[in-house]
Image: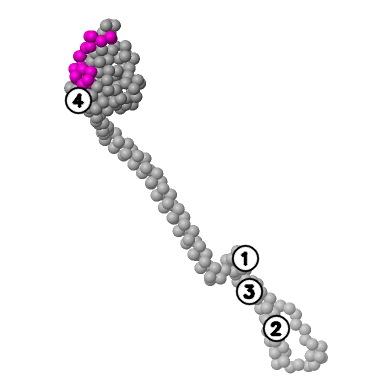
Amino acid sequence: MPGFTLPHAVRNTRITRTQKVSAALVATASCAAALAFTAAPSDAAAPAAHASAVVKPVSANGLPLTAKDRADDGTKERAIASSVADGLKVTTVAKQGHTDKPAANRSVERKALASPKKAAPKVHKAAPKRYANNLDGWIRESLDIMKAKRIPGSYEGLHRNIMRESSGNPNAVNDWDINAINGIPSKGLLQVIQPTFDRYHVAGTANKLTDPVANITAAANYAADRYGSIDNVNSAY
């Protein structure tokens, strides 16, 4: 306990017993107050130190977070969590789709192997044109060949000259004119000699002087070269 000294004026004054007791009580109270004042800071420091240990959240700019900031942070966290969940779902679906594609391809391959190949459609060739085995048929067949070979002539021109030369007999033979005398008689529907037939024979027809179609087409080919067309022939040629 610290010493307590009475003022000088009091030391020189005679005091009673009661005054001494009162002074002692005052001194005792002063000491108690001094001790209480000295101990108080150490007791108050504990809560302060404890309070300093609590870390208050702050924003990016260093200021304490407001209620709005904490609400925004919560929204951002939920958005990030939702984005991550969506990414996981997309990845899962993509993997599942990648897994399903090979299975689908294998299914298509199995169907292709199992399905019988369709037969190629049959191409029906046009049946060859048929001609009557008579003068009319021979003339018509000759005209088709002449048309393909670009040899001029008409049905009328051919028929007219045939009737004059052979009367429509494919085996007719002239054994009295100059050609017969020279050993190369005229033969066939249009009375053609062998050298002329050999020179003007039309490819695709029989290589025979008395063949009706071969004889007509060779004679028409010769007349086209010599007279422009069999239609222009009106007498022996």
Distance, label 2 to label 3, CA atoms, is 22 Å
Real-space CA distance between mark 3 and mark 1, rounded to the nearest whole angstrom: 32 Å
Separation of residues labelled 3 and 4 (CA atoms) = 142 Å
Q: Which residue is mark 3?
A: 44
Q: Nearer the viewer, mark 3 or mark 4?
A: 4
Sequence-wise first label, 4 or 1: 1
Answer left or right for 22 relative to 175: right
Answer whether labels 2 and 1 touch (C-beta < 8 Å).
Answer: no
Where is residue 44 drawn, in percent x and y?
Answer: 63, 74
Residue for badge 1? 61
The amino acid marked with disc number 2 is: Ser
Badge 2 vs badge 4, beta-carbon distance below 8 Å: no
Whichever of labels 2 and 4 marks the residue nearer the N terminus, that label is 2
Q: Which residues are magenta?
A: 162-179
The earlier-in-sequence mark between 3 and 1 is 3
Residue at (47% x, 62% y) in the render = 78
Query: Distance between the Cα atoms at labels 2 and 4?
Result: 163 Å
Q: Which residue is mark 2?
A: 30
Q: Amino acid at mark 4?
A: Asp
Q: Quadrant of residue 121?
A: top left
**Label disc, if present, on residue 136 of the rendered structure:** 4
- Image vertical order of residue 33 relative to residue 122, above or below: below
Q: In this view of the protein, which residue sits in the foreground, 172 or 198?
A: 172
